[in-house]
Amino acid sequence: MMMKSKKLFDWQQLVTKKRLFDPTNKEDKIEFAYFLQTKRWNSIVCPFELEWPYLTVPDMIKDKLAHHILKVEKVWE
């Protein structure tokens, strides 16, 4: 019985470790490249937090990377 509650605790811990995607962070870009190649995240769950006004994490990351590469500022921030 204790084992079951331990697994639930581990799952909650994974979910709360989400972070904001940073287009300047090499590790974040490697994580997204892995997703593009395999259609799944390298970790058990998506490691990135979905931000407003985006509907999906992959679309959010693509937009953030495009803005970063083209050096275009977002108008809603």
Image (spheres, grey):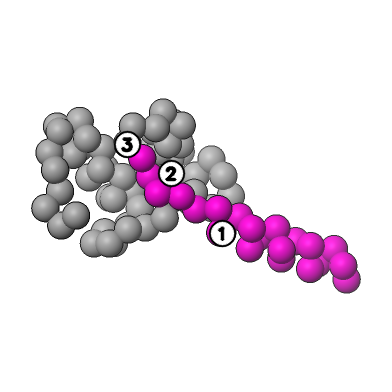
Give the spatial CA distance, label 2 vs label 1. 19 Å
Give the spatial CA distance, label 2 vs label 3. 19 Å
Quarter that holds the C terminus: bottom left
Q: Earlier in the sequence, mark 2 or mark 1?
A: 1
Magenta range: 1-22
Q: Residue at left 23%, top 62%?
A: 53
Task: Judge from the rendering whether residue 50 lies leftward or rightward of residue 10; answer left or right.
Answer: left
Quarter that holds the N terminus: bottom right
Residue 66: image location, x then y, percent: 20, 37
Give the spatial CA distance, label 1 vs label 3. 21 Å
> Vertical placement of 9 versus 59: above or below?
below
Residue at which label 2 appears: 39
Q: Residue at left 71%, top 65%?
A: 8
- Most extreme residue toward the bottom, as rendered? 1
Dots 2, 1 in contact, CB < 8 A: no
Q: Residues within 10 Å of mark 1 (few under 14, many from 20)?
A: some
Disc 1 residue type?
Answer: Val
Residue at which label 3 appears: 23
> Vertical placement of 24 versus 5: above or below?
above
Disc 3 residue type?
Answer: Pro
Q: Residues within 10 Å of mark 3 (few under 14, many from 20)?
A: some
What element does badge 1 sit on?
helix
Dots 2, 3 in contact, CB < 8 A: no
Residue at which label 1 appears: 15
Disc 2 residue type?
Answer: Lys
- 29 drawn magenta: no
